[in-house]
């Protein structure tokens, strides 16, 4: 509740709590923490948690209600993904490193104990494994190697910067790996 309607200080504290223990909250609380990090100017941390959230939210979207989790995931992806990808995409190497760290960390952090209504433990574990396989680091690295020059040219065409990340905010803690 404090993430949505609390003071700025309360929102920031709630975001810190969620990012320190993401296993305690439904993955759909993470975008509120990501938005708080964006407001704080912590683009690098917001990007990290956005990619972490992509993996965590995919099984929910796949097995949850199409009008619920799937629609909510699409909305958050459209709202948060645009600014994060536009910013982080200026430096493909940095983007790849953030993705690698987020996906690696996601696999280490315990899952939230809940799951969509009516989904059994076996189906849930299969969906989690499928989501993690979808965000395969080797495939992502190969795609970056093939596409980075094309992406840089497209960014120039679209008047987006190429080069080092501007105003990243606080660095990622060493433990987020």
Image: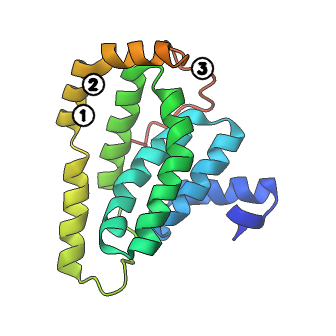
Residue drawn at (22%, 49%) of the image: 134
Q: Earlier in the sequence, mark 1 or mark 3?
A: 1
Residue 108: % across, % down = 31, 54
Residue 145 horizontal side relative to residue 172, left or right: left
Q: Are marks 3 and 2 in contact (CB under 8 Å)?
A: no
Cα distance between the residues tagged 1 and 2? 6 Å
Cα distance between the residues tagged 3 and 2? 20 Å
Residue 90: % across, % down = 48, 20
Residue 122 horizontal side relative to residue 113, left or right: left
Residue 144 circle label: 2
Q: Nearer the viewer, residue 109 or 48?
A: 48
Q: Earlier in the sequence, mark 3 or mark 2?
A: 2
SS class, disc 1: helix
Query: In the rendered image, which quarter contains the C terminus?
Result: top left
Q: Nearer the viewer, residue 23 or 29?
A: 29
Residue drawn at (53%, 58%) of the image: 30
Residue 4: % across, % down = 71, 64
State whether residue 95 is above or below residue 18: above
Q: Which residue is mark 1?
A: 140
Q: Nearer the viewer, residue 134 or 129?
A: 134
Residue 82 circle label: none
Residue 166 circle label: 3
Residue drawn at (69%, 71%) of the image: 1
């Amino acid at each position: 509740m404090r993430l949505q309607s609390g003071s700025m200080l309360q929102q920031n504290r709630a975001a810190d709590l969620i990012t320190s223990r993401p296993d305690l909250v439904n993955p759909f609380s993470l975008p509120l923490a990501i938005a708080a990090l964006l407001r704080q100017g912590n683009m690098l941390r917001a990007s990290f948690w956005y990619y972490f959230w992509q993996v965590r939210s995919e099984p929910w979207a796949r097995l949850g209600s199409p009008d619920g989790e799937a629609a909510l995931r699409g909305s958050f992806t459209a709202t948060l993904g645009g600014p994060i990808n536009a910013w982080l995409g200026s430096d493909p190497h940095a983007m790849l490193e953030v993705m690698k760290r987020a996906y690696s960390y996601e696999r280490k952090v315990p899952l939230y104990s809940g799951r969509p209504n009516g989904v059994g433990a076996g189906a849930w574990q299969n969906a989690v494994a499928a989501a993690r396989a979808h965000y395969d680091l080797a495939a992502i690295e190969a795609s970056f190697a093939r596409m980075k020059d094309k992406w840089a040219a497209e960014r120039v065409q679209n008047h987006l910067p190429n080069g080092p990340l501007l105003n990243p905010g606080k660095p990622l803690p060493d433990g987020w790996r």
